[in-house]
Image: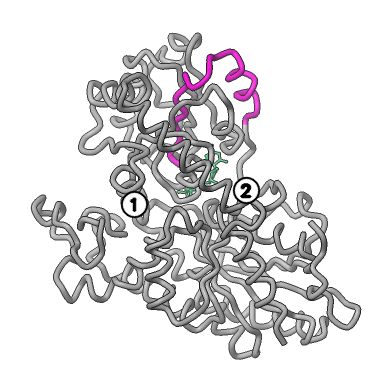
Amino acid sequence: MAAHSNAVHGGRRRHVLLFPLPYQGHINPMFRLAGLLHAHGFAITVFHTHFNAPDTARHPDYRFVPVPDGSPVPVAIEDVVAQILELGVACESAFRDRLASILDEYSRDDVACLVADTHLLPIFEVAARLSVPTLALRTGSAACCASFLAYPMLFEKGYLPVQGMQSQRDMPVVDLPPYRVRDLPVIGEDDGGLVRELLSRAMTAVKTSSGLILNTFDALERRELDGLRRDLGVPVFDIGPLHKLSPAVDSSLLLPDRSCLEWLDAFPPESVLYVSFGSVACMSPRDLVETAWGIAGSGVPFLWVVRPGMVSGSADDHRLPEGFEAAMRKRGKVVAWAPQEEVLRHRAVGGFWTHCGWNSTLESVCEGVPMLCRPYFGDQMGNARYVEHVWRVGLEVGGDLERGRVEAAIRRLMTDEEGAEMRARACELKKAAAECTGEGGSSRLAIDKLITHLTLP
Ligand code: UDP
């Protein structure tokens, strides 16, 4: 990719400053964006917390600026929202000092912009006080962003808070189709207070920025993108899927076990089920056991990521049933972390049992891999709704996890005609993604607009 001439100013490269939210699903798209902007000629400076800090040695072309963060530690899902809110506040004053000294060091005209995660409102506020223009990166879908915007209305109209009644949970949200109440972004037993605060801050960050960057593409979410453009009042750059548009970037916090790629080579095309619930979701020891026996009973070959800390209430991750791994050796492999994009690209993979984090969903869509959806929290329920109901490239495994139901769901996806139809539709989406990211495609045009936006005086 040729360096964009506008990224050079007075003979000097212009700088883009970035501040990711320090969780894997937020770090990956921010680093992909960094790669994209760097390839267009911008110098990259990454502010980061000590918590989940990037491995700077893997990115020798970037400058890294650590920001003290109040020393958070990994917490349970129910506490992640509070942690995110605290993180931004804890970084605020140290970030102000570091940004001020960067502005002294770089000529101010050479700083094109600060791109920060929408969940870091205090960072946006500091930038505004120091007259640094900002762009907001939202790492979820356009539909999810629309649900964030609609959150106050959802309370006014009584859809939220969720009271726990099944009838309420199944109710369609007529103001926000295709969501039902159960698909809205809620976390744990929160009555809406903390999540409401988080989402309201995220939308303030967007509305006070010079634009919103979304890791999605037009063919996937045209209606939702049109809605956001109408409702937000700032430019929206749909420049996804970023992992297909940016040079390969290794921003993984855990070391992937690459032996699984060779292991996959031994299997026929589209025969293996890949199972992974992302970097944060946890399951109970009971659900782990039911999942294990359900996968075993399906008879389908599988590659399963059992991440350290994935089983709630246990420091010991190996709660897999006694003898399970040995019994499954011929047709199953368990790893602690996988090179997921490459796994999904492997011809042997025919299905993905996922928690429906947005990155995982996009990565699956881009490889034409249909999904079994088991959402846990946040935007995952909404993503699963789109997978099953809108794009029709997967099905949800809802209710209590029970081995018989798991078995049946896996067979529906991997061996039934229904699964073949989902795979065919997923292949159509893969083609649509390739068109959007190809020459003259919508995401390429959006990147051009973003670069122009960044280089406006
Ligand atoms: N991932 C990975 N290896 C794994 C599991 C996940 O590289 O074994 C990556 C995956 O490719 C994705 C990210 O971690 O880019 C997870 O982001 P997502 O939004 O799907 O879920 P989250 O972890 O935020 O819940």
Q: Along the horizontal axis of the image, is 265 left or right of 201?
A: right
- The amino acid at mark 1 is Phe
Residue 244 numbered mark, or none: 2
Residue 274 in magenta stretch:
yes
Circle 1 crowding by C-alpha within 10 Å: few under 14, some 14–19, many from 20: many
Residue 175 vs 105, above or below: the answer is above
Circle 2 crowding by C-alpha within 10 Å: few under 14, some 14–19, many from 20: some
Q: Give me the residue at 74% from left, 64% from top.
A: 64
Residue 103 vs 404, above or below: the answer is below
- Residues drawn in magenta: 257-278
Q: Along the horizontal axis of the image, is 301 left or right of 419?
A: right
Q: Along the horizontal axis of the image, is 243 left or right of 59?
A: left
User: Percent from the top left, x then y, of residue 22?
Assistant: 56, 59
Q: Nearer the viewer, mark 1 or mark 2?
A: 2
Residue 254 numbered mark, or none: none
Does any portion of residue 213 appear in the rendered image?
A: yes
- The amino acid at mark 2 is Lys
- By what rule are the colours in the image chosen? one colour
Does any portion of residue 51 appear in the rendered image?
A: no
In front of the other: 195 or 411: 411
Q: Give me the residue at 47% from left, 10% from top.
A: 326
